[in-house]
Image: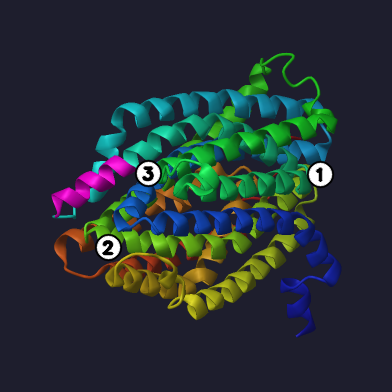
Amino acid sequence: MGRIRDKYFGSRAFYASALAIALPIAVQNCFTNFVNLLDNVMVGQMGTLEMSGVSISNQLLFVCNLCIFGTVSGGGIFCSQFFGKEDDEGIRNTIRFKLLLGAAIITTSILIFIFLGRELIALFLSGEKDQASVRVTLEQGYSYLRIMTLGIPGFLLSQVYASTLREGGETMLPMRSGIIAILTNLGLNYLLIFGHFGFPRLGVDGAAIATVISRYVEAGIIIVKSGRFPFFRGLYRTLLIPFPLFRRIFRAAIPLMLNETFWSLAMSALVQCYSTRGINAVAGYNIANTIIQVANSAFLAIGSSIGIIIGNLLGAGKGEEAVSTDRKLIVFSMMVGAATGALLLLISEVFPLLYNTSHEARRIAAELIMIQGLFLPLFALRNASYFTLRSGGKIMITILTDSLFMWMVPVPLAFALSRFTSLPVPALFAIVQSSYIFNCIVGVVLIKRRVWVRNIVA
């Protein structure tokens, strides 16, 4: 029994050191998602159609955000190991790479949203027969999307700076700047959505304006406060990166960016499959997904900390310590997933009552929340496995077990069930979620084979 405890569970000091990195990330993520929840509830007070339009637009923005995340994560693999090696110039060059590739991504995204936004939103409304409802949802969604494009550059800057700080173990500054931005967003939402204290009542446009302003508040704070760190000094003296290093980072970052892109597109495809059941299905999924993202914050933060901690150990040449540490962190992540899953089950019937929407949308939301609560430990394991494999630069393996798996199993499954059966959304959702067990099995096998134990900056 003692050997099992020592193998799979750490000491109090072990968890304290892990939580020192994970907790600020979890607090920021949880706070962000909680405020998104409040925003969602505020928009939800306007009605089902407005809420559905915003939900669809956010699904499109989610693809752009994940592309940015993939870019900073690809550079982050090197950045984390450069921190372990204590190489400031290597860190600076990695930051420059994140900025350059990120600028190309956001330019492309903004052009797509401006010129093809209506057509993309319409894809999610194909299951609704009431054309009047379709028109209102489309207009509300597109108006929100156009304004939100203005905040994409601010999002890129905050992600580049915050990710770099976290990779070096500095998690408090990103957390503080994120919380200030979130409070700004929440306050402006209250004023601009409903028109309180003499402000104009702007509805969904007010929600978008509030988010855009908060993005630049966060970016401004984190850029100004980051000046005290040596690896940010001289960052903009040049944007040229030594070609051998650029090529190495590019080889890691492009596949990872493509992985995040195709994964986010797969998630959007799943939502589109669920949307074939009508506006109530879109609204119900949006309600459920909002609280699910809050619950996911805890184990997602542990996954991020796995990437940082294991990357630092691998960069310092401590392979065996990385293996032992990773095993304990994966078990810890699953325990957190089980605890948050239980909380979802407890609130599943109550949470949808916060929304001013139809009884059918609330019923769908409650059932989706319960289903996700049962599957949360599985998704905690999947997330921890992903960050473990990525920490050693095994990008192609993470693509195979992440986005490629999504397009080979869940998406075709959801497509077939949504087009060729009359199953309701909760049943579709449950079947799709259960398919991820195969992905987890592959991840565990690869971790046990230690294919990820590599120092890529030696």
Residue 233 seen in the current view: yes
Which portion, as a residue range, is magenta? Answer: 130-140
Residue placed most toward the observer, 425 or 154: 154
Residue appearing at x 76%, y 61% in the figure: 19
Give the amino acid type for the residue marked by disc 1 in the picture.
Ala
47 displayed left or right of 134: right
Mark 1 or 3, closer to the camera:
3
Residue placed most toward the observer, 425 or 40: 40
- The image's mark for residue 80 is none
Q: Earlier in the sequence, mark 1 or mark 2?
A: 2
Disc 3 packing (10 Å; few <14; some 14–19; many ≥20): many
Residue appearing at x 84%, y 35% in the figure: 86
| Image: 326 above or below 243 | below
For the residues labelled 1 and 2, the Cα–Cα distance comes to 52 Å
For the residues labelled 2 and 3, the Cα–Cα distance comes to 16 Å
Residue placed most toward the observer, 443 or 283: 283
The x, y position of residue 11, in whole percent, is: 83, 71
- The image's mark for residue 280 is 2
Residue appearing at x 54%, y 78% in the figure: 342
Q: Earlier in the sequence, mark 1 or mark 3?
A: 3
Residue picked out by circle 3: 57
Q: Earlier in the sequence, mark 2 or mark 3?
A: 3
Give the amino acid type for the residue marked by disc 2 in the picture.
Asn
The x, y position of residue 359, in whole percent, is: 30, 72
